[in-house]
Image (cartoon, helix red, strand yellow):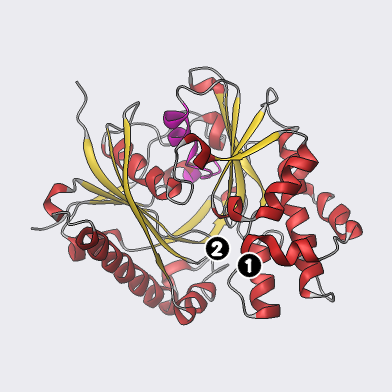
Amino acid sequence: MSHIYKVIGLMSGTSLDGIDVAMIETDGQGIVRPDAAAFFPYDTAFRDEMRNCLGNPSGTQDPKVREAEIALTKKHAEAVRDFLETYDINPKQIDLIGFHGQTIWHNPEAKQTIQIGDGKLLATQTRIDVVNDFRTADVQAGGQGAPLVPLYHRALAHDLPKPVAIINIGGVSNVTWIGSEGDDQIFAFDLGPGNALIDDWVSRQAGLSCDKNGKLAAAGKVDQVQVAAFLSHPYFQKEPPKSLDRDAFADFAPKECSTEDGAATLTMMTVRAVVHGLTQMPLPAQTLYVTGGGRHNKTMMAWLAQESGLSVQSVDALGWDGDAMEAQAFAYLAVRSHSGLPLSVPGTTSVPAPMTGGRYHKAKN
């Protein structure tokens, strides 16, 4: 019988809103039992500090990025302590932490991906063993290094009718397509922008962190010319698997229009990128299950159903926690890393062969 680990996963996504903390019990294979989850928001000043690190290929060689990395790691340690205290969990009950860190640079064609976050420091501060740096091995082997959540999606979707498509709309949007069993029956790639450009737009225009429920987009008018120009981007002609940097489409941010029209145009860009991605899947899925922050955007969900002609549902309809899934996934991947199991396969990142990864940091008690 395989060993069941009690693991905490930590995720700070490209939307830079804060830290998702989730606990699961898993063997890193077919057994997954999700448990408690919580969210710890970043304050505006820290979000700005993180934003200033984005797009910096120097990584922690830059003293400012290293300073931000230490601050980020300490915030994650604090989130773990608060989480354990809230749920009255003894840290000694936790076998492992999966620590994603913050992606600041992603250029797999140049074999580069940088997630800041000091795994050794986190292990010292929490006194729990840590696995981090999940993407580097895949990228060094010629893979895209993203998305990494698909193998967790497959474990969760074990009993669902196939084929099924799970769309994650976070800062960037990506898809996991699952056929029958086997590594050749899973296919994943980044679809296009998710919420990041919308969040950046409403932050600049109206001082808001997001377009809550898609209200601004619903009140705006879509610039179809701009959406058509966006869809002519070479990325959409590339064959998957493929992956994106958070700001790959930043040039398509509206220049001069109302806050509402800009939100509407950017929301339609996200929707059309997803719909285009559906044409690149091996077989059509009848239902789209949506996870990530985008599923809370009522306008985005309605337009996605309208533009795709498919049934579009939140993963919450399956009893999954769509806010915690990425954090849960990195808990699951931490166990796979610790057990030497693959974190990615050719169909998920185009890595040449199934690939493990991650760096393990033993806590000193």
Q: Which residues are magenta?
A: 139-157
Considering every residue shown, the one lying at the far right of the view is 225
Image height of 207 relative to 294, above or below: below
- Which x, y percent locates residue 314? 57, 42
Residue 238 visible in image = no
- Which x, y percent locates residue 76? 32, 65
The quadrant of the image that shows the C terminus is bottom left
> Dot 1: few (<14), some (14–19), or many (≥20) neighbours within 10 Å?
many
Front residue of this view, candidates 92 and 340: 92
Image height of 178 relative to 73, above or below: above
The residue to which callout 2 is attached is: 15
The residue to which callout 1 is attached is: 199
The stretch drawn in magenta includes residue 207: no
Front residue of this view, candidates 67 and 268: 268
On screen, residue 66 versus residue 53, left or right, reads: left
The quadrant of the image that shows the N terminus is top left
Which mark identifies residue 94?
Answer: none
On screen, residue 315 versus residue 43, left or right, reads: right
- Which x, y percent locates residue 118? 32, 63
Q: Name the element at disc 2.
A: loop
Q: Name the element at disc 1.
A: helix
Residue occupying the point 69% across, 71% down: 201
Q: Amino acid at mark 2?
A: Ser
Residue occupying the point 49% across, 46% down: 322
Question: Do tag 2 and tag 1 residues touch (Cβ < 8 Å)?
Answer: yes
Instruction: Give the quadrant of residue 15.
Output: bottom right
Measured Cα–Cα span from mark 2 to mark 1: 7 Å
- Which x, y percent locates residue 213? 64, 60
Q: Earlier in the sequence, mark 2 or mark 1?
A: 2
Front residue of this view, candidates 315 and 121: 315
Q: Amino acid at mark 1?
A: Asp
On screen, residue 288 versus residue 233, left or right, reads: left
